[in-house]
């Protein structure tokens, strides 16, 4: 299995919450989000899992963490890397597949994910 690209890709993004974290970082006008902003957008995720997934996505090069240690407390902002931004296209295709084959959701079909207000609430 270690030579299968799909298997290896799913090891990176296939864990629970990973796709939703990427989408949450993509949503809205602000490209940089603090930990609590991401957590507020993802109802049901625990701080421990969010921290773990952010670290995994950062290690894989999909998320960038910027640390500002010139302030107290230290501020950390998260954003998508170019690789993470490129992966949003795949998430959009998953949405299109779901709308075509599984879900009749006119609100979702009419909304671009970047402006979505109800995705995870």
Image: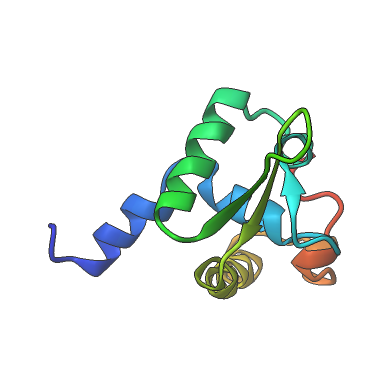
Q: Nearer the viewer, residue 69 or 108?
A: 69
Residue shown at the point (55%, 53%) measured from the top left? 19
State left or right for residue 11 relative to residue 30. left
Q: Residue furthest front?
A: 70
Q: Nearer the viewer, residue 76 or 58?
A: 76
State left or right for residue 73 relative to residue 53. right
Q: Quadrant of residue 92?
A: bottom right
Q: Is residue 6 visible?
A: yes
Q: Position of residue 87 (x, y in %)?
A: 53, 69
Q: Position of residue 1 (x, y in %)?
A: 12, 57
Residue shown at the point (71%, 34%) measured from the top left? 74
Q: Tag count in the figure?
A: 0
Q: Position of residue 14 (x, y in %)?
A: 41, 50
Q: Is residue 106 visible?
A: no
State left or right for residue 44 relative to residue 118. left
Residue shown at the point (60%, 64%) measured from the top left? 98
| Quadrant in which the C terminus is drawn | top right
Instruction: Say if 29 sits above or below 51 in the image.
Output: below
Q: Quadrant of residue 48?
A: top right
Q: Position of residue 94 (x, y in %)?
A: 55, 66
Q: Quadrant of residue 68?
A: top right
Scheme by which the image is coloured: rainbow
Instruction: Say if 88 sits above or below 35 in the image.
Output: below
């Amino acid at each position: 299995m270690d030579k299968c690209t799909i298997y290896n890709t799913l090891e990176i993004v296939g864990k629970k919450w990973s796709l939703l974290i990427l989408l949450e970082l993509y949503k809205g006008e602000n490209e940089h989000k603090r930990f609590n902003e991401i957590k507020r957008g993802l109802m049901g995720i625990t701080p421990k899992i969010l921290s773990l997934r952010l670290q995994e996505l950062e290690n894989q090069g999909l998320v960038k963490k910027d640390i500002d240690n010139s302030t107290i407390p230290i501020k950390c902002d998260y954003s998508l890397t170019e690789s993470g931004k490129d992966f949003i296209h795949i998430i959009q295709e998953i949405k299109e597949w779901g709308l075509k084959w599984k879900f009749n959701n006119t609100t979702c079909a009419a909304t671009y994910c970047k402006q979505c207000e109800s995705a995870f609430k």
